């Protein structure tokens, strides 16, 4: 019997160095405001696309279209969620066993910060 082990979230883009893993882990603890400030100053185009869902930050940017951006986002603490097709940052709110079978936007408040405070 052949078994396959699939994951929903990729751990890192292929071009990420192992030495950046600790930076990635540390940045996952940043607050929502810190992540948004980082996007606003370093990646203003992505800030325009950022959506806050609950306390998490989501970015709808394909990793295959922009592989170098994937590396930068991953180093900032984002991870790619294959099921939802977005980059996500937990902003210090981890629930490794939690799973939302439906869209979390139905449960949590969702807004686009660029609509409130432009880059």
Image: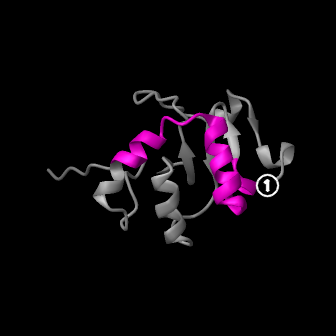
Q: From the viewer's perspective, is 73 left or right of 22?
A: right
**Residue 108, can we see it?**
yes
**Residue 81, can we see it?**
no
Q: Which residue is drawn at 50% across and 70% down?
A: 68
In percent of width and height, residue 1 lies at: 14, 50
Q: Which residue is drawn at 74% across and 36% down?
A: 110
Mark 1: few/some/many CA within 10 Å (<14, 14-19, 20+): some
Q: Give the range drawn in magenta.
A: 22-50
Q: From the viewer's perspective, is 1 left or right of 41?
A: left
Does the magenta portion include 47?
yes
* Quadrant assignment for the C terminus: bottom right
Q: Which residue is drawn at 52% across and 28% down?
A: 93
In percent of width and height, residue 105 lies at: 69, 35
Res. 102 image quadrant? top right
User: Is most of the magenta stretch helix, strand or loop?
Assistant: helix
Q: From the viewer's perspective, is 15 left or right of 74?
A: left
In percent of width and height, residue 8 lies at: 42, 47
Judging depth in this view, the residue of 95 and 38 nearest the camera is 38
Q: From the viewer's perspective, is 92 left or right of 24?
A: right
Query: As drawn, which residue projects farthest toward the front?
Result: 41
Q: What element carries label 1?
A: loop
In percent of width and height, residue 82 lies at: 48, 53
Q: Name the residue under label 1.
A: 119
Q: In this view, does 33 lie above or below 62?
A: above
Q: Is residue 27 above or below residue 92?
A: below
Does the magenta portion include 102?
no
Q: Which colour scheme is used?
A: one colour
């Amino acid at each position: 019997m052949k078994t396959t082990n699939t994951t929903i979230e990729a751990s890192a883009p292929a071009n990420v160095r192992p030495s950046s893993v600790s930076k990635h882990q540390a940045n996952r603890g940043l607050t929502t405001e810190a992540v948004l400030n980082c996007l606003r100053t370093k990646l203003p185009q992505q800030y325009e696309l950022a959506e806050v869902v609950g306390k998490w930050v989501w970015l709808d940017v394909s990793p295959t279209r922009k592989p170098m951006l994937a590396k930068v986002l991953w180093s900032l603490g984002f991870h790619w969620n294959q099921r939802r097709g977005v980059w996500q940052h937990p902003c210090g709110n981890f629930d490794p066993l939690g799973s939302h079978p439906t869209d979390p936007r139905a449960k949590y408040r969702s807004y686009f910060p660029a609509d409130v405070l432009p880059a």
